[in-house]
């Protein structure tokens, strides 16, 4: 579904991503592990079209997307739930969700269907439709951020650090929901510092260090890898 070929990206004059190649097959849940500053968010922003790569190719379902505008990439079926949630705090839950459907707002029946689907995953959001997003708890805000990304009806959902700053019980709930989203047919690329949790729900994974892929394998292989255990699993 997604393939990166020797992608290089910069922030200003500083190259952050150094020749990254990876793939995500349709139906997979793939995790991207790496410490803070490894380049995970920059890579996600590059796939999303927010940052244009200096070189390399990004293919989505066989079609090059690395020169496309972000809104066209969303229309093609890639949605990003960014690190830090990036909600509109003074807007209601309902309006935040509507913003997630901005590329398809004319199809009102499809938007209504998306509302029903995200309420199945996150019933609390239906109860809080008129509440300002900024007044919700951290866990509720993360649920809203994921739901907003799903309102675009993506084929590929990218989640950047969804567990950041959340209590362990909330993290468990979020990860279970990510698994359910994947079971419903959405391919998922998950960026996480919580390596143990990410590997426990994913099929395969990549390890990103200083803007380079240094390891890849099945989640079981990465769990058993001594370097991963030492650097990411606290063993």
Image: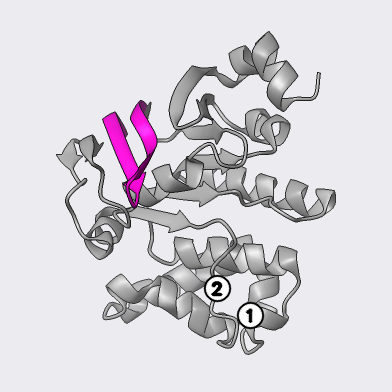
Q: Quick one: which residue is furthest to the front in this view?
A: 13
Q: Residue at x 44, y 49 (%)?
A: 157
Disc 1, SS: helix
Tag shown at residue 22: none
Residue 178, position as x, y percentages in the image: 59, 47
Q: Residue at x 55, y 41 (%)?
A: 191
Q: Residue at x 54, y 17 (%)?
A: 218
Residue 34, position as x, y percentages in the image: 58, 33
Q: Is residue 174 left or right of residue 212?
A: right
Q: Quadrant of the N terminus?
A: top left
Q: Label 2 crowding class (10 Å Cα cut-off): few <14, some 14-19, many 20+?
A: many
Residue 149, position as x, y percentages in the image: 46, 62
Instruction: State the image quarter where residue 119 is shown.
Output: bottom right
Q: Return the residue at label 2.
A: 87
Q: Is residue 234 above or below residue 179?
A: above
| Magenta span includes 9 | yes
Disc 2, SS: loop
Instruction: State the image quarter where residue 69 is shown.
Output: bottom left
Q: Check whether the beta carbons of the residues at disc 1 and disc 2 lie within 8 A of each other.
A: yes
Q: How many marks?
A: 2
* 16, 220: nearer the viewer: 16
Q: Quadrant of the C terminus?
A: top right
Instruction: State the image quarter where residue 166 is shown.
Output: bottom right
Q: Residue at x 72, y 82 (%)?
A: 135
Tag shown at residue 133: 1
Q: Is residue 172 left or right of residue 8?
A: right
Distance between mark 1 and mark 2 Cα atoms? 7 Å
* 215, 223: nearer the viewer: 215
Q: Magenta region: which residues?
A: 1-22
Q: Does residue 124 appear in the picture of this structure?
A: yes
| Magenta span includes 10 | yes
């Amino acid at each position: 579904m997604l393939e990166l070929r020797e992608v290089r990206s910069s922030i200003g004059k500083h190259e952050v991503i150094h020749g990254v190649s990876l793939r995500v097959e349709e139906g997979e849940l793939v995790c991207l592990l790496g410490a803070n500053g490894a380049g995970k968010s920059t890579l996600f922003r590059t796939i999303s079209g927010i940052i244009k790569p200096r070189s390399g190719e990004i293919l989505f379902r066989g079609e090059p997307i690395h020169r496309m505008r972000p809104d066209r990439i969303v229309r093609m079926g890639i949605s990003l739930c960014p690190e830090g949630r990036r909600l509109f705090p003074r807007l209601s839950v309902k309006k935040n969700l509507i913003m997630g459907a901005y590329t398809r707002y004319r199809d009102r029946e499809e938007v209504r269907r998306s509302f029903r689907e995200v309420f199945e995953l996150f019933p609390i959001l239906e109860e809080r439709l008129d509440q300002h997003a900024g007044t919700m708890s951290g866990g509720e805000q993360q649920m809203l951020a994921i739901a907003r990304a799903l309102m675009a009806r993506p084929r590929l959902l990218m989640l950047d650090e969804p567990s950041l700053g959340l209590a362990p019980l909330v993290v468990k709930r979020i990860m279970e929901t990510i698994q359910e989203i994947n079971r419903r047919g959405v391919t998922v690329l998950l960026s996480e510092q919580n390596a143990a949790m990410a590997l426990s729900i994913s099929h395969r994974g990549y390890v990103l260090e200083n803007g380079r892929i240094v390891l890849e394998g099945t989640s079981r292989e990465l769990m058993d890898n001594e370097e991963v255990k030492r650097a990411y699993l606290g063993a």
